[in-house]
Amino acid sequence: MFISSLRRLTGSFPRRHRSASKQRVYRPPRLEPLEDRSVPAAPVAGSLSAPFVSQLYRDLLHREVDAPGLAAATALLDSGQVTRTQLVQSVETSPEYRTARVNAIYFALLQRSADPAGLSNSLAFLNAGGTPEQLTAMVAGSPEYLQTKGDGTNAGFLDALYRDLLGRTGSRDCSRDFNPSTCIISNRLAARADPEAQAVLVPAMDAGLSRTQVAAMVLGSDEYLQKVVQNLYGIYLHRTPDTAGQAAFVNYLHQGATAEMAIALLAGSDEYLMKVPPSS
C-alpha cells in the first residue's frame, strides 16, 4: 500500500542518484498528440477519481485497489492536493511497486525471482536514488547472467543481451520452409548481436570494459528506447505511439529520464483518464 508515499509527495519527478553538482533537470516532452485525443485538461471530477485510481492499481500493481488506498487517493485527487501524475509517482515509489519491479527485472534476465538478499539490496539501491535501468544493467552484468545466459563468454553474453533487451530472436517457422536448414541458420543469426557490435564490444570487454557498462549502452540505445515507448503506449493508452509522441518520448529518455517518469506522464494524461471505464 502506498498511503505513506502520498505524504512524501514533492510535486517533482524523481531524479537519478547524482551528486548535487551534477543534477540535471529532465524536461517532460510536450504531449500534443495526447491532448488532441482527449478533453481539455481539468481537475479530476469526483465521478472519475475512483475509476482512475482503480485502473491505476490494475496497471501498476496488477491487483484491485484496497479500500483504504482508494479512499486516501480519491480524497487527495478530489481536493486538488495532488495531480494524477503525482499520484502515479507515489505508487511508483511504494515498496509494493518497487518489489514487483525488482522481481520483473530478475525474471526477465535470470528467469527467477529475486532472492531475499538480492531483493533487499535492490530495494535499498532504488530507495537511495538508483534507477530500474541502472539495476537492470547491474543484474545483466552479474556473473550469474554470464554463466546462465552467456555460456561464460563475452561473445555469448552480448548475444544474450541482444535477445533479452532488444528482443532479437529468430522467430521464423522453419517447419514448412522450402529450405529448413537455411531457415534454421537464419534464425540463429537473427538471435545474435550485430557483427559490428561483436567486433567492437567483445574485444573491449576482453580488454576490461565491464559487462554492466555494455548493458547500460544497450539500455540507452535508440532501438531499446523505441521498444520501451511502444510498450508503454500499448499498456497505458492502448495504441501504438504516433510519430511525434514516439520521437518526443525517446528524446526524453535519452536525456536521462526513466521509464517511470514516462509512465507518470502517460498514466497522468487526459487520454489515459478518458479510456478508464466509468464503473471501473
Image (tube, grey):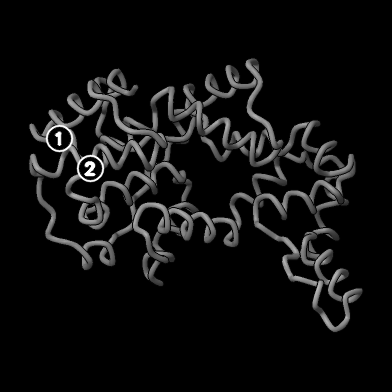
Dividing the picture into quadrants, the one containing residue 211 is: top right
C-alpha gap between disc 2 and disc 1: 10 Å
Viewer-proximal residue among 207 and 125: 125
Q: Secondary structure at mark 1?
A: helix
Task: Look at 53% across and 22% down and name the residue there.
Answer: 123
Instruction: Report the amino acid beneath label 2.
Output: Phe
Residue designated by label 2? 52
Residue designated by label 1? 77
Task: Look at 23% across and 21% down and name the residue there.
Answer: 68
**Rendered location of residue 82, percent (x, y):** 18, 34
Label 1 neighbourhood size at 10 Å, few (<14), some (14-19), many (20+)?
Answer: many
**Rendered location of residue 231, percent (x, y):** 48, 56
- In the picture, the quarter occupied by the C terminus is top left
Above or below, comparing residue 55 to residue 222 in the picture:
above
**Rendered location of residue 83, percent (x, y):** 19, 39
Question: Residue 179: which numbered mark, if any?
Answer: none
Q: Secondary structure at mark 2?
A: helix
